[in-house]
Image: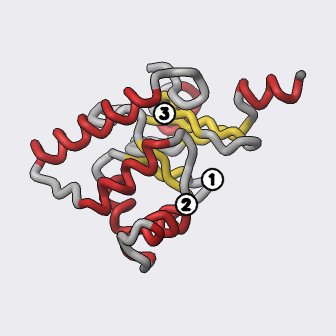
Amino acid sequence: MDPIGFSNHDHAHCISGNLAQIEAQCKADGLQLTPVRKRVLEMLLAEHRAFGAYDILDRLRAEGLGSQPPVAYRALDFLVSHGFAHKIERLNAFVACAHPGEIHAPAFLICRKCDMVAEAQTQPARGALGSSAKLAGFQIERAVVEAEGVCGNCADECNT
């Protein structure tokens, strides 16, 4: 899977395709995609950048969908726990999953200039981390891989 976020792509299709897939998965799994949860998901899908919970809450408040922090946190918890969104630990913020419904180990490429986030794939049980874990008798169940740097667009701006 190619990283999604920095490259040019049909973002409208990206949004509608992921939303439709998540709605179908919720229906199939008997999950409640409430209006607030759906709206938070739409906000996250609208851009390939991370949003903090209070950014989400401000938008929900402006739309009349809630004004208390638990509203945003509950929606984000639901989305993350079902794999529809990811928490970016470095930023204490959230992004929509670029590959909902697929079993994958995401790695996040975070541009320090524009705050865009691309979701790439990794295999934490392989490579140096996997080797170290194996030597320690440790079985990796979850790893958060986040790399901070400069995306191609921002690098091009600096070089012009």
The amino acid pointed to by label 2 is Gly
Q: Nearer the viewer, mark 1 or mark 2?
A: 2
Question: In which quadrant is the N terminus drawn?
Answer: top left
Where residue 45 sits: x, y (%)?
43, 42
Numbered disc 2: secondary structure: loop
CA neighbours of label 2 inside 10 A, class few (<14), some (14 to 19), many (20+): some
Quarter location, residue 160: top right
Q: Secondary structure at mark 1?
A: loop
| Gap in angstroms between the C-alphas marked 3 and 1 | 18 Å
In percent of the image, x 43 and y 77: which residue is there? Answer: 67
Amino acid bearing label 3: Pro
Residue behind mark 1? 90
* Residue situated in front as seen by the camera: 119 or 145: 119
First in residue order: circle 3 vs circle 1: 1
Looking at the image, is mark 3 or mark 1 nearer the viewer?
A: 1
Left-right relation of 36 to 68 = left
Q: Nearer the viewer, residue 134 or 37?
A: 37
From the image, state whether disc 3 or disc 2 is nearer to you.
Answer: 2
The answer to whether any part of residue 37 appears in the image is yes
Instruction: Please report contact status of discs 1 and 2: CB closer than 8 Å, yes or no.
Output: no
Q: Point out residue 91 in the picture as x, y percentages from the top left corner.
A: 62, 55
**Amino acid type at image mark 1:** Arg
Q: Quadrant of residue 103?
A: top left
Tally of numbered discs: 3
The residue at which mark 3 appears reads as: 124
Dot 3, how many residues are within 10 Å of its Cα: few (below 14), some (14-19), or many (20+)?
Answer: many
Alpha-carbon neighbours of circle 1 within 10 Å: few (<14), some, or many (≥20)?
few
Q: Looking at the image, is 63 positioned above or below residue 140?
A: below
User: Which comes before the other along the chain, label 3 or label 2?
Assistant: 2
Q: Would you name the residue on which mark 2 appears?
A: 52
